[in-house]
Image (cartoon, rainbow, N blue to C red):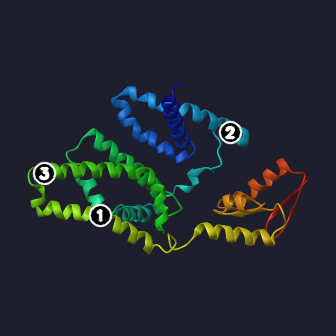
Amino acid sequence: MPIATASCWSRRGCWALVFVVRPTNGLFLLVFAIPLLRDGRLIRYGLYLLGPGLLYGLYNHAVYGSPWRTGYADIRTDLVSEVFSQHFGFYLWQTLAQCTPLLVALALWGLRPWSWEKLFYALWFAAFLFFYSFWRSGGDRWWWSRFLLPGFPAIFLLAALGLQRVREQWCASAPWRDRRVVALFAAIALVPVWQVYFGWSQHDLWKRNKGHDYYEITQRIEAVVPPHSMVGSVEFTGAFRIYTGLTGYISVFDSTPDLIIEGLQQSVTSTSWSSRGITPTR
């Protein structure tokens, strides 16, 4: 197989693996159904998911006993209507702040004239916006907008269409003599300035070395718990594995203690408990 062809297939495989390992990426399937219905030949792109999907299913079967069972809990209990209005407004505001009003305005301008392609882009973003507006967690800090990241490319593509429309209407001849054109391109040039300002104003971004924080916290925990303990946390499981000899587990779910007990019963013969961690002993 030529190197170029092998590289192309490897990239497709990596993309497909990233796609299948997060259950909510299934929202893409709802959106991509639109172009698929208009051109059935596009189904060939879905075939790229078969290989990585099979590998992921085998992994789930080996670890959780079923190809359909993952490390995620039943997400239906996390979808609640009570948070919708607050989260919906929050995510719209964060989209406006992080993508900038200019980019959002160009995206809205790009929706006209209407077409199937633009409907596809609009639903692409809307699928993630509406789904996570029902999600129980989030809605209070800027970094929850990471939920919308899979939908942001649709805004960028619509903004490109909007800029093309502006170009067609304003740049017919001698565009640099038109003050509107000069103002628009000046605003586009200032977008990175806004991005830097927005990032700097978030005190937990750039101003802090979070990697060092993770190292310090895990080292302090390791110093006070018995060796080989299992330590529950929300986001430090990877850091415990990298920086210490401890085992971390995610304790964000109410069912975590039951899952830990189940895991210990399957892998150890006895368990000693401490107030700070769980220490399995064979």
Secondary structure under badge 3?
helix
Residue picked out by circle 3:
169
Q: Is residue 172 left or right of residue 153?
A: left
Q: Which is more toward the observer, 64 or 225?
A: 225
Number of the label disc, if any, that sits on residue 59: 2
The residue drawn where x is 52% and y is 38% is 16
**Distance of label 1 from label 3 (alpha carbons):** 21 Å
Q: Within 10 angstroms of label 1, few (less than 14), some, or many (20 or more) residues?
A: some
Q: Nearer the viewer, mark 3 or mark 2?
A: 3
The residue drawn where x is 61% and y is 49% is 74
Q: Which is more toward the observer, 220 or 190?
A: 190
Secondary structure under badge 1?
helix
Q: Amino acid at mark 1?
A: Pro
Give the x, y percent position of residue 139: 47, 65
Number of the label disc, if any, that sits on residue 101: 1
Farthest residue, direction front: 3
Q: Earlier in the sequence, mark 3 or mark 2?
A: 2
Q: Judge whether 74 appears above or below 232 on screen.
A: above
Q: Judge whether 192 appears above or below 65 on screen.
A: below
Give the x, y percent position of residue 14: 54, 40
Q: Amino acid at mark 3?
A: Gln
Give the x, y percent position of residue 147: 48, 56
